[in-house]
Structures are given as structure tokens and as C-alpha cells.
Image (tube, rainbow, N blue to C red):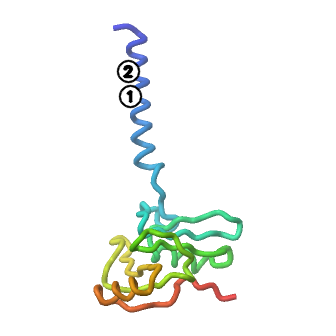
Amino acid sequence: MTKSFWIGIIIIIIVSVMGVFYQKYLSIHHCAYDGSAVTAIYEVDIVLNDGSVKKFCSIYCATKWFKINIQVVDHVIVTDEIRGNKIDSYMAYFVESDLITNKTNNNRIHAFQQRQHAQTHAKKFNGSAIDDPFEIDE
């Protein structure tokens, strides 16, 4: 076996390892509060005054971060759990229910774009409507 054969094998191994590393660690978003992987249907984006965005895995993590950093927050975008649409939090309907979306932090707060979906969820999972947890008092 020649030297160039072994160099080729080593290059293939290095590229394969880099590809696996990228897919596992770099291609998914991680929560800015606890580092958990962000599931698209529960994603919360907090847009800061400078235009940058912080991504969170759940409303629980986003509200924890929001409360201590409210002075740098411009607005909050939540994901509708039914359709996956991104909407400003002030337009969303929130429900706190028995359904847990994240077992790490026991998130029980859900966001919906339509009131009917929020009411249906509340009835189905023993929940109740709550106010926007990201309301900014000015």
C-alpha cells in the first residue's frame, strides 16, 4: 500500500468525523438559557435592541432569561404549536396546562396563534388561559 493511499484514507476519516460533528452539534440551535436542543415547534426567539436574536427551547427558559434581561429586549417571537408559524408574543394566546413540552424544565406553557386552538388545548389538557409572559411594561 502506497503512502498516497493511506493519506487518502486519513482524509476520508477526518472529513467523515467533521461531518458527524457538524450534524450533531452545529446544525441544531441550542437554548440560550440552558443549552438544550431547540425543537422547532416550541422555539421562542427573543429579538434584542441591537437586532440580534436569542433562541430558546421553551417558554419556561425564555421567560427566565427575559425577566433578568428585559432592558435589552425589543420583542419576542413565539411558535404556534399547531401550525409552526412564528408570531409576535403580543398576538399569541397562551395556555398553562398539564401537558409538559420539555421534561428537563417541566415547561407547561403553550402558545397558539388562534384562540380556538388555545381553548381546545386548555379543555383537552386541563389548562387555563394566561397573559403574555413576555409583556413589556413601558
The answer to whether residue 103 is above or below residue 128 is: above
Q: Which of the image's four quarters has the N terminus? A: top left
Name the residue at 63% across, 78% down: 70
Name the residue at 41% across, 63% down: 39
Residue 69 rendering spot, x and y as whole percentages: 62, 75
Looking at the rendered structure, the kind of residue marked 2 is Ile
Residue 82 rendering spot, x and y as whole percentages: 39, 73
The answer to whether residue 129 is above or below residue 90 is: below
Answer with the quarter of the image where residue 49 lies: bottom right
Label 2 element class? helix
Label 1 element class? helix
Looking at the rendered structure, the kind of residue marked 1 is Ile
Name the residue at 48% across, 69% down: 85
Residue 13 numbered mark, or none? 1
Which of the pair 34/38 is nearer the observer? 38
Answer with the quarter of the image where residue 8 lies: top left
Which of the pair 80/110 is nearer the observer? 80
94 lies left or right of 65: left
Residue 30 rendering spot, x and y as whole percentages: 47, 59
Answer with the quarter of the image where residue 36 lies: bottom left
Q: Which of the image's four quarters has the C terminus? A: bottom right
The answer to whether residue 11 is above or below residue 132 is: above
Q: Which residue is mark 2?
A: 9
Name the residue at 28% across, 86% down: 124
Do the residues under discs 2 and 1 have CB atoms within 8 angstroms? yes
